[in-house]
Amino acid sequence: MLSKIANPRQMSFYSTFEEQLNHKHPLYILAKEMNWQQFEDAFKDLYCVDNGRPGKPIRLMVSLLMLKHIRNLSDESVVEQWAENAYYQYFSGEQCFAAKEPCAASELVHFRERIGEKGIELIFKESICINGNDANEDEGIIDTTVQEKNITYPTDNKLHRKIIKKCIAIADKEGIELRQSYTRTLKKLSLDQRFRNHPKNYKKARKADRKVKTIAGRLVRELGRKLPPGGGYATYLALFSKVLSQKRHDPNKIYSLHEPHVQCISKGKEHKKYEFGSKVSIIATKNSGVIIGAINIEKNDYDAHTLDPALEQQQQLTGHILKKGFVDRGYRGVSQVRGTQICIPKPFDKKLSKHEQQKMKKGFRRRAAIEPRISHLKNDYRLSRNFYGGIFGDNINVMLAAAAMNFKRMINIWKKMFLAFLFQLLQITHKTLESLFIKKINSKWAF
């Protein structure tokens, strides 16, 4: 059910909540610049009108999602800090300071699921619009990266032991008596698996690995025989069987039981040979660096094949077609996608003039500017490790991170403008005082 509209009248006898805040604070300015009404219009149909418990205000929930990624916080932390920060509350549309948490942290999960990918895309679109003409450049820089999933480093032994635990849990839940739980056996095998890198322990550890896999297979087959048909566990048993049967070089391997869609991606990094997550394509404007496209790629596609969905999203969000997109040599094989010329570093054609060659060289040098932006997305805006579940979580995490970076860009610009104004004011004050002091000295010693 939709929440009631808050009363905007003065809540204090002496001054309003708005008057008590610093009007030069970036969050205050961002709250004024945002088009909050479009979120109200887009999301109100997702609530019933006169049935059920009233929901939290739409502006409050949208602002919490934005603040979470702008300040790199968890759901729990952003809710706690909201109760302590007056600017967070004004940004969320509050009319007076509230010394309590706005909602439970789990309500953010439900709100993300309620608005879906289209709602998150609307927030991303607003972050592009708020950057004004900086987001309307005709040339862009494009690159791909990996957002890692929040899973442990996968090994066969870890997966097999998790299968055993889940099989025992299913048997306990359904009241099935297993022939053996293997608790004591697994404890002995874990001792044999220690220090596997030592030459004397290698064979013993390998033998223990095979034994753990055998036990996992026994439990899966026993559950398959004893579980009643139509019990809802067929998907789990099929997943367990696939994990047990997969080989080292098989395609489409399973690396996590609770996130089976995770891909193993190698980007050629010296410090991190393999990353487990999903591929992400980022498009930014060439000069200003506004992120105008951020999309998750479900499969480990070749970089050139990611250009079509990435540029489709960019054109849908911005409403214009990029003339040129500068990429690295990993995109070899394409020259034009959806009306955008793809520029890849290679020996120049002799037909190009010196001026055109110089412009292309500047563009290729400028393409490297997307690398630190990806680094900031990962380190400051929660793209390095994705804590949202499923493919839906992969899709929304990259858009929320990109939206947060666009909002933070404008916040930093407003900060610089305010500091420049203060510096100029101090200079004027200093000159005025200096001139008054000189006049006073001259008048005192005048004959």
Image (cartoon, rainbow, N blue to C red):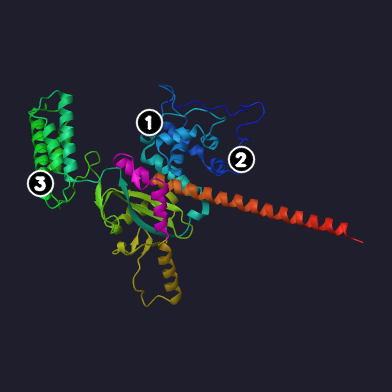
Return the residue at label 2.
Answer: 22
Of callouts 1 and 3, which one flags the residue occurring earlier in the amino acid sequence? 1
Residues tagged 1 and 3 counted as in contact (Cβ below 8 A): no
Mark 2 secondary-structure assignment: loop
- In percent of width and height, residue 117 lies at 36, 41
Q: Residues within 10 Å of mark 2 (few under 14, many from 20)?
A: few
Q: Circle 1: is it few (<14), some (14-19), or many (20+) Cα within 10 Å?
A: few
For residue 275, side relative to residue 34 (left or right) = left
Q: CA distance from mark 1 to mark 2?
A: 32 Å
**Amino acid type of the residue that numbered disc 3 sits on in the rendered structure:** Lys
Of label 1 and label 2, which has the lower sequence position? Answer: 2
Disc number placed over residue 204 in the picture, else none: 3
Residue indicated by mark 1: 106
Residues in magenta, as a range: 369-398
**How many labels were placed on the picture?**
3
- Residue 124 - label: none
Magenta stretch contains residue 424:
no
In this view of the protein, can residue 237 be seen by the observer? Answer: yes
**Residue 221 lies in quadrant:** top left
